[in-house]
Image: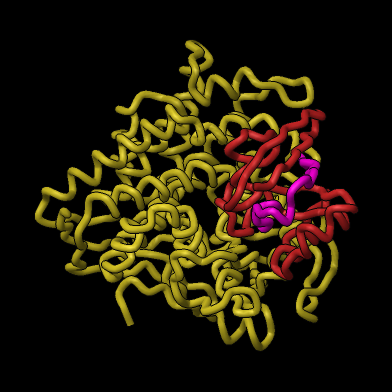
Chain colours: A red, B yellow
Amino acid sequence: MAKITFITKDNQSIVVEGTSGSVMELAKQANVKGIDGDCGGVCSCATCHIYLNEADLLKTGPASEIEKDMLELDDDANEFSRLCCQIEVSEAIDGVVFQVVR
Amino acid sequence: MKKSSLPDPFQDARISKGYGEMDDQNDPVTMLLRLKDVRKAAHSWDTFQSGATPGRIVIPSEVAIRNIRQIPFELDPPLHGDFRAILEPWFKRPLESEYEQKLTKQINDIVDAVLVKDAIEVVADFSLCLQSNALTLLLNIPFEEAQTWISWGTHVFRSDGVALDGDKALILYNYIDQQIQKAIQNPGEDLYSVLLASEVNGKKLTAEEVKGVMILTFAGGRDTVINAVTNSIAYFAEHKQSLEKLRDEPEIINKAVEELIRYFAPLTQMGRVVTKDTAVCEHAIKADSRISLCWASANRDATTFENPNEVVLDRKMNPHVSFGFSHHNCLGATHARQIMKILLMALSQKVKSIAILDCKENIEELGEFKRKVGYDSIRVKFTAL
């Protein structure tokens, strides 16, 4: 079980718990504003963009090349950016805080 | 080769030089063929603009048949974003449960109807009807209106043997003018009325701007959706096991939708006008000439997609560009994805098999390339589960 916190652009804090699937799916189930996940999680739409805290970078692991290529052309992207459809929900990310970009 | 295959004519040029060339009504086009180049150019709106002469970024060019600017498609940032912001919520309505339920009923009804027929021609008797019916939901107007659009035939802009038909375009433009006038006199909850009541940068949209949005909504979602639906039927006809897979594993339907849309690339390419002398793939491009973002080629780029010429229904990483990329990504994508998702659910739950009786392919002539984008006609026989 992983406890995950989303902070939306209008500063709402939403805490959800999950055991499997992607972080994007979890966010959609909880109606987290700013996480659309239009493509269903295949890394083609970039509508699930989040920022990580520096301390959480190790927990989620690095982005794949394909994900990095998507983020490279996103005007809001920075070194803490991830597409959360590419982050699996597991014990390893328990306690992580995600800042929703849009 | 299977009848449902869509070969990739761009492979050699994509690998060897990265671009292709075609003429289009004496306004030549340099076609970008690699995924990364296509995405970069789509993102670089200041060098590769959309806000050129109306009709010029479309291939084949519509400059000769259209003066109205399609909105927000033929605008550049920041104005593009201002219009896009008022349109986004409306075009996300397909995610609402009532919309989804109505669309499901429409598509189930159409599938049920073809299951009891001997044979049907898919483009005219299935895809066009499905697309037209669904458009009534997107516009939030009475279902019966679809009959008018169905009566126009499969192409608003194109007739057999004539790439651009000004008379056909006029049918659409005159129709939209009439609908806008109706909405001005008697406002309702339809898209025309909502647009007429909307403001961008503190100013109400003009009738011409509303017309620009409506032309885009009609034209952008017609051939594309018809190709996606028709090609899906052809694919499942020759891949019965894929129907079974979706029946057994409905949880992969979203991935299957993305994969079919990648493979089909229902819109081959979209143009841009170059604002300053530049280069792509070490090929010089002059200011005021045209490039195209060739989505169909980018989707088969083996540097990103494993086995790009195969349909892998549960493909996990699928950064395709069938809905475009960056600022101008497809406004109707939510609607299109819902159509495909519901269609795949209906087919997998109701159809045992589909047999192709005969077909005529729709081949686009693109300079050095010939690309099959779908079918002019395809007759099939459905068998119910």
Does residue B72 appear to the left or right of B263 in the view shown?
right
Image quarter in which the C terminus of chain B is found = bottom left
Residue at figure coordinates x 22%, y 55% from the top left: B351
Q: Residue A77 or B154: which is nearer the viewer? A: A77
Residue A9 lies, in percent from the top left, at: 80, 34
Start-end of magenta stretch: A84-102
Residue A60 lies, in percent from the top left, at: 76, 58
Residue A60's place in the image compared with B36, above or below, is above
Residue B13 lies, in percent from the top left, at: 61, 84
Q: Say whether residue B279 is magenta.
A: no
Residue B87 lies, in percent from the top left, at: 63, 32
Does residue B151 appear to the left or right of B12 in the view shown?
left
Quadrant assignment, res B280: bottom right
Q: Residue B54 or B104: which is nearer the viewer? A: B104
Image quarter in which the N terminus of chain B is found = bottom left
Residue at figure coordinates x 47%, y 46% from the top left: B336
Instruction: Say how many tags the image has.
Output: 0
Q: Say whether residue A90 is magenta.
A: yes
Quadrant assignment, res B312: bottom left
